[in-house]
Amino acid sequence: MECTEHIKDLLKTVDADGSGVINYTEFIAATLAKEQTQEEGLLWAAFKIFDQDSSGTITVEELMEVFKNRFDENELGDQHIEDVMAEVDTNGDGVIDFPEFCAMMRKADGIAEDAEVAPEPET
């Protein structure tokens, strides 16, 4: 594909109203979408650190393993890790999935809890 064709395709994608011009709102929307994609990529990378068996979920055992490798056992006890699991596992299935992980990270970062969470990125 030629560069010109690629640019035309990008413009068509961003030009939501089909006017042939990218207005301010369309530009901002495209920029925010890119930032959200980058953020979700970082969240996915962090999630994979905890999801040691690549099952798509984080178990309490995986949390304990990661935390104990990074903190002194006196700093972070089993009860604290179980409390974290209970708080983050909002659907009560005993594991933390990617949307729950994202919600926890966004809450910790001060981002609205109701922010839309994308499904797990394909690997």
Image (tube, rainbow, N blue to C red):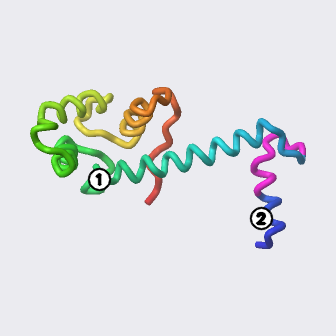
Dot 1 crowding, Cα within 10 Å, few <14, some 14–19, many 20+: few
Viewport quadrant of the N terminus: bottom right
> Disc 1 residue type?
Ser
Whether residue 14 appears in magenta in the rendering, the answer is yes
Instruction: From the viewer's perspective, tell me whether residue 18 is left or right of residue 60.
Output: right
Q: Is residue 116 magenta?
A: no
In three-dimensional space, the C-alpha distance between marks 2 and 1, rounded to whole angstroms, equals: 37 Å
Image-based side of 111 in relation to 69, left or right: right
Nearer to the camera, 18 or 111: 111
Residues rendered magenta in the picture: 10-19
Residue sitting at x 19%, y 41%: 60
Q: Residue 27: percent from the left, percent from the top?
A: 76, 43
Q: Picture coordinates of residue 64 (x, y %)?
A: 17, 44
| Residue on which disc 2 sits | 6
Kindly state the secondary structure of the residue where label 2 is placed: helix
Please state if 12 lies on the left or on the right of 118 as rendered. right
Q: Label 1's element?
A: loop
Q: Is residue 15 above or below residue 84?
A: below
Instruction: Residue at 49%, 38% (x, y): give it.
Output: 117
Q: Specify whether 100 is left or right of 61.
A: right
Tell me the residue at 28%/49% (across/down).
Answer: 50
- Label 2: few (<14), some or many (≥20) within 10 Å? few
Q: Is residue 95 above or below residue 114?
A: below
**Quadrant location of residue 95?**
top left
Q: Amino acid at mark 2?
A: His
Farthest right residue in view: 20
Q: Work out whether mark 2 precedes mark 1 in sequence or the reverse, and give the earlier one.
A: 2
Q: Is residue 86 above or below residue 33?
A: above
Disc 1 marks which residue?
A: 55
